[in-house]
Image (spheres, grey):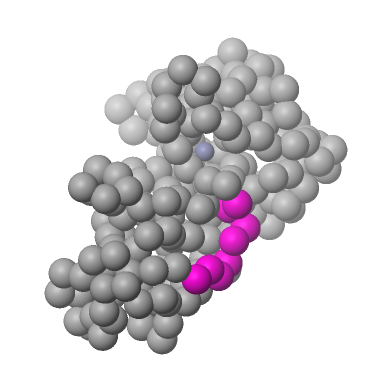
Amino acid sequence: MKITKTLFYKDSYLKAHQTKVIKIEGNRILLEETIFFPQTSTEPGDIGKINDRKIVGLKKEGEEIWHILNKPSVFNEGDTVNLQLDWDKRYNMMKLHSALHLLAGVFDARFKERAVAGAVKSNLAYLVFKHELLDETIQKALDQANKDIEEELEIKTYEDKKRKGFRWCQVGNYIPIPCGGVHIKNTKEIGKLALKEKTTETGKQKLTIEMK
Ligand SMILES: [Zn+2]
């Protein structure tokens, strides 16, 4: 088992990088280092290019991150290749994902309401709560989040001191949340948050938000 060095944790703004091909299996390729974030259950994965070949997906297998190409690989093991990230897609995802951290932090700190799930789906993101929230609470939380965005809160990410590979994310002074995702550095990058939709299913409430 090889270890793919994940550069997106050190620098989530890294858009291009040069690295070496380690292994090839059909249309999948293993690299020494990667700038591409593999999808999780809560964040979409990256797309981009290795030289002029499109990456259509990523697959994490243990410590290995495999890059799936749209065609069989033309590379050889040992080749030096250029990685190019689809930055627009990634940046949008980082902003929405970080916005969820902020909003979940506000709900927890101001209203003692803890989100039980949350995810980014394309241009939208959502939080799920165990029960229905008052409209007034939702509005106040969004107002507070937008105020925090204007106040340019720092977003910190760090590895757990005891558990190697286990990561945390904290927005301003809000509660730190365990998270292996990629984040922006400051809330100001989010712009403005708005409620897109509010739905209730089997007693749980889902708040879908968008960036304006
Ligand atoms: Zn996160």
Residue 204 appears in the rendering: yes
Looking at the image, which residue sits at the far right? 151
Decide whether residue 105 is among the magenta residues.
Answer: no
- The prevailing secondary structure element of the residues shown in magenta is loop
| Location of residue 82 with respect to 12 vertically, above or below | below
- Range covered by the magenta-colored residues: 11-18
| Location of residue 200 with respect to 36 vertically, above or below | above
Residue 123 appears in the rendering: no
| Location of residue 7 with respect to 117 vertically, above or below | below
Is 180 left, or right, of 14 in this rendering?
left
Is 61 left, or right, of 89 in this rendering?
left
Looking at the image, which residue sits at the far front? 78
| Location of residue 162 with respect to 100 vertically, above or below | above
| Foreground of the two, 208 or 184 | 184
Residue at 56% x, 38% y is 100
Is 66 left, or right, of 123 in this rendering?
left
Quadrant in the picture for residue 50: bottom left
Q: Residue 73: give x, y in percent of width and height.
A: 24, 80
